[in-house]
Image (cartoon, grey):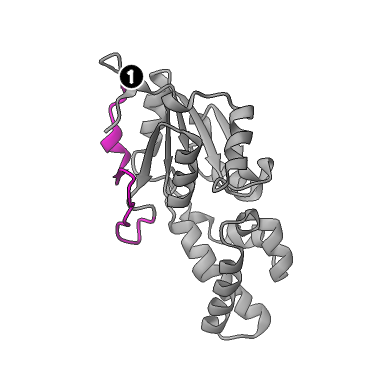
Amino acid sequence: MVDWNRIDTVLLDMDGTLLDLRFDNHFWLEHLPRRYAEKRGMAPGEAAALLAAEFDRRRGSLEWYCVDYWSQRLELDLKALKEEVRHLIAERPQALRFLEELGAAGVRRVLVTNAHPVSLELKLAATGIGAELDRVYSSHAAGAPKESRRFWEWLAASEPFEPARTLFIDDSLPVLEAAADFGVGHLLAVRRPDSALGPRETGRFAAFDHFSELLPVRRNGVAS
């Protein structure tokens, strides 16, 4: 699926790519609405519908991903609420092995995520991915989400990489489109980011189910 002799850098999304999206979907669609309903004295279904409308209004913006924004907007401590369900945080199958093989093959491994620093810290502490990454970038430091060109310009200034020799893996089609527009040469989508749900359509982007499909990492015909 990948010609590793043409790749020097791999840019990797976190939620839904390296990590199972089950945690995030459960938190935003079930756990948070339940806690919000308890605080407001509402029916859970009513709270879920209200929050879904709120989320849709901010979709694609940096605020949509911002723990501080939603903590203030909803008057809830989202950091504490995320801790309540942190047991659901997990790597996707073979993600760690994939990172290890990239490192052994001399491919630079860079995490690029829309996750807020609070969420990022929680997930790095709960998993083993941090030790297998060369750099970590959050779009909150850029002041723009990955869906925007502004983010990619900021990333290129912060982490010099040659777009034509870079592979970017993400579960978000709008983010992949932004990367394509910037000129990233190799793009892959994740077909099943949430282990509790079925596969998704990925449009024009090639996709994979498990990292085992990308292994072994071979450079110059030699496996790492």
- Going 57% across and 24% down the picture, which residue do you hit? 160
Q: Amino acid at mark 1?
A: Asn
Quarter residue 6 falls in: top left
Secondary structure mostly seen in magenta is: loop
Q: Give the image location of residue 60, x and y in percent.
A: 56, 57
- Residue at 35% across / 61% down in the picture? 196
Instruction: Give left or right: position of 99 versus 65.
Output: left
Image quadrant containing the N terminus: top left
According to the image, label 1 marks what residue? 5
Of 146 and 124, the residue lying toward us:
146
Above or below, 130 relative to 41: above
- Nearest the eye: 159 or 116: 159
The vertical placement of 34 against 77, above or below, is: below
Helix, strand, or loop for circle 1?
helix
Q: Is residue 175 visible?
A: yes
Question: The C terminus appears in which quarter of the rendering?
Answer: top left
Residue 191 colored in magenta in the image? no
Q: Is residue 4 left or right of residue 139?
A: left
Q: Taking 71 as reference, is 13 left or right?
A: left
Magenta span: 194-218
Q: Position of residue 10 (x, y in %)?
A: 44, 30
Kindly identify the residue that appears in the image at 59 percent across and 27 percent down: 159
Crowd tier of the residue under label 1, counting other residues whose Cα lies within 10 Å: few below 14, some 14–19, many 20 or above: some
Number of numbered discs = 1
- State whether residue 172 appears in this view: no
Whether residue 201 is in magenta: the answer is yes
Residue 212, position as x, y percentages in the image: 28, 37
18 sits to left or right of 43: left
Quadrant of residue 188 within the rendered picture: top left
